[in-house]
Image (cartoon, rainbow, N blue to C red):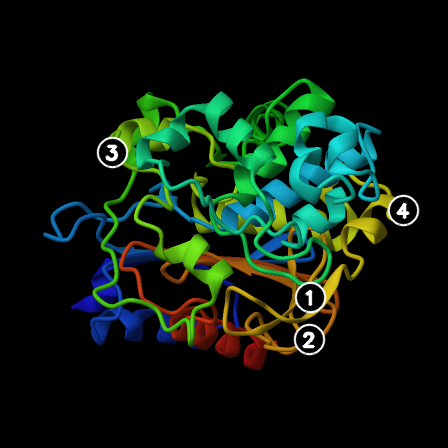
Amino acid sequence: MTSDIIYGDIAPGFEAVRDVFTQHFETGQETGAGFCVYKDGETIVDLWGGHQDRAKEKPWQSDTLISVFSCTKFVTACVTALCVERGDFSYEDKVADHWSEFAQNGKDDVTIAQLLSHQAGLSGITDPAWQAADWFDLDKLEATLAAQKPLFTPGSASGYHPVTFGPLVNAVVRRASGRTVGQILREDIAGPLGIDFHLGLNASEHERCADLRKPSAMADFGEPNVATKAAFFNKHGSPGGRGITLWRETEFAGSNGHGTAKSLARIAQMVLDGAIEGTEFLSGDTLSAFTKERYSGPNLVLPFDLKFASGIMFNPPNYFYGQNDDCFGHSGWGGSCVWADRESGLTGAYVMNKMSNHLLGDPRPRALIDALYKAL
């Protein structure tokens, strides 16, 4: 029976969430998945089930790791906020104040807040000689992005940066703080608190990783423009050609974090009040700057109207993460998502290995989140 492969705990009153989670396996929508929710720092839902592999021979465990793709941006945004808190830079600083080479080709006035809200005009790499393996050459990657001409006037619009976001933000963080995003995450947040989320996954942990099952159909981008084509349609627009082992070990701070639903839900608590389970990371001023609106309107790359803070999305106008306005989230390729709802005190995350072609608002987590809010 399908229910025999569903594990975990739920607080009384949230049985409907488990029912929806189970139904997704019964209807073939899932191979393996996890869903975890905290309320005011206490776990109310922690479910996992299914299998790590397509052959369904290896059960999904409570500590199974999976790439959450762009949900990594939510984590990186939290690390960046910690850098702001510590005075490494402010959101209003120009990127070129910390990375002088970035000022080339009309990018001299781009601020860190604009970079984090996808307003830099660098949604993809446009060098025709660029190869998938070049993403693993950090010096070449940063030099290419610093020299590239923006695809649109910086600050005039937001055009989602699916893969370039990570190396761009990491370049600023590394120069300003002396450490990479992944190092700060490990040494200052995940390590001390025992949070099982990794950016740059040690080879010793790869055995815990589930196999990804990529979607069979391309997502619907509408009528692609130049920025969309650079982001998603270039042949070598994402890292490749070096094998999954190196990909997992390399830090791509916007696209290849590995973790569990529980680890994401724990980190998301930082957006509620600046703290994770009593450990304070952000002051009220930094949290306000972090969650301040930086852009709202049509996105040039994704076919949605989106409202961005510094690296995370507001729940309105699409309400992918529940029903409340004072809520922030992010989604990842294939369906994963993470959110923090300050109105209800909820943080949660959904992860899976059977990927769908929904760009944002995958129906599976939306159904789980709807059942959760109905049970409140």
Give the structural element (helix, strand or loop) at label 3: loop
The image shows residue 187, relative to residue 89, as above or below, that is above
Whether label 4 touches label 1, CB < 8 Å = no
Q: Quadrant of the C terminus?
A: bottom right
Q: Nearer the viewer, mark 4 or mark 3?
A: 3
- How crowded is the residue under tag 2: few (<14 C-alpha within 10 Å), some, or many (20+)? some
The image shows residue 220, relative to residue 193, as above or below, that is below
Give the structural element (helix, strand or loop) at label 2: loop
Residue type at mark 1: give it: Cys
Mark before the other along the chain sequence, 4 or 2: 4
Q: Nearer the viewer, mark 2 or mark 3?
A: 3
Mark before the other along the chain sequence, 2 or 3: 3
Residue type at mark 4: give it: Asp
- Quote the CA–CA distance across marks 4 and 2: 22 Å
User: Which residue occupies 38% across, 26% down?
Assistant: 249
Q: Nearer the viewer, mark 4 or mark 2?
A: 4
| Foreground of the two, 285 or 25 | 285
Mark before the other along the chain sequence, 1 or 3: 3
- Residue corresponding to mark 4: 285
- Residue corresponding to mark 3: 241
Q: Residue 201's x, y, as percent?
A: 40, 28
- Residue corresponding to mark 2: 324
Give the structural element (helix, strand or loop) at label 4: helix
| Foreground of the two, 40 or 155 | 155
- Quote the CA–CA distance across marks 1 and 3: 38 Å
Hey, which residue is sitting farthest bottom in the picture? 374
User: Which residue occupies 59% across, 37% down?
Assistant: 168
Residue type at mark 2: give it: Asn
Residue 327 marker: 1
